[in-house]
Amino acid sequence: MNNIIIKTKNLSKVYRLGTIELPVLHDVNLQIQSGQLVCIVGPSGSGKSTLMNLLGCLDTPTSGEYFLEDRKVSGLPDSELARIRNRRIGFVFQTFNLLPRISALENVMLPLFYAGTADPRPAARAALERVGLTDRVNHRPTELSGGECQRVAIARAIINQPAIILADEPTGNLDSRTGQEILKIFKELNEQGVTVILVTHDQQVSQTGQRVIRMVDGRVVKDEILN
């Protein structure tokens, strides 16, 4: 059996706006095995993006515990969470989050640049090759299609060889054909051993995974294995 890479115990999140408390996540208990392809599904406001932010160490829980690779990370200082994000987790977002004035290659290099790598260009070129963009390395995002921009974002996410990729609505801004091509890349990465977690409201996208976690009103209401 695969090792448990993610484990949460009664994970909850409450946002405070002045004197008002807004609970958005309630007592989430999950175990995700290394090498799984998991889809977290739910409508807008269901808490799925908040959960992704917690799993990605982009935010901290109000209560409960989060273990990543057997290490308790809930409660760690921001500097340590940043180190974990840089080395162990790759992020892909609906809006790509690319810098428009630099090339695809330079966008992909950024994580290694921030990590202090002396020459990140070879690794960036290899990452772009993995997503089929060897002929677009010198193009800026404004010169690329939406699908190509998302491929650049995926290349940036995998350049540090992360254990986990978290993708928030990765096909949301793409047409259905291009979306299927992007999902195929995630499947291929998963087959290579990367744990992939897709966050989506699209029921069709949810069928991509081996496992579907359904959320409503900040709670996990269903957790099923598809294959």
Image (cartoon, rainbow, N blue to C red):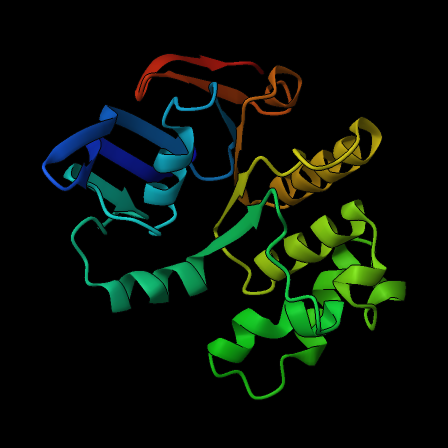
Q: Is residue 6 visible?
A: yes
Q: Quadrant location of residue 76?
A: bottom left
Image side of residue 135 versus residue 49, left or right: right
- In x, y percent, where is residue 140? 78, 67
Q: Nearer the viewer, residue 186 or 176?
A: 176
Image side of residue 64 versus residue 181, left or right: left
User: In this rendering, is residue 209 above or below 119?
Assistant: above
Q: Which of the image's four quarters has the N terminus?
A: top left
Residue for point 81% across, 69% down:
137
Image side of residue 168 versus residue 208, left or right: left
Residue occupying the far front of the picture? 18
- In x, y percent, where is residue 217? 32, 17
Residue for point 35% across, 61% down:
84
Residue occupying the far right of the picture? 135
Q: Quadrant location of residue 52?
A: top left
User: In this rendering, is residue 132 above or below 200?
Assistant: below
- In x, y percent, where is residue 81? 30, 60
Residue for point 62% across, 86% down:
119
Q: Which of the image's four quarters has the C terminus?
A: top right
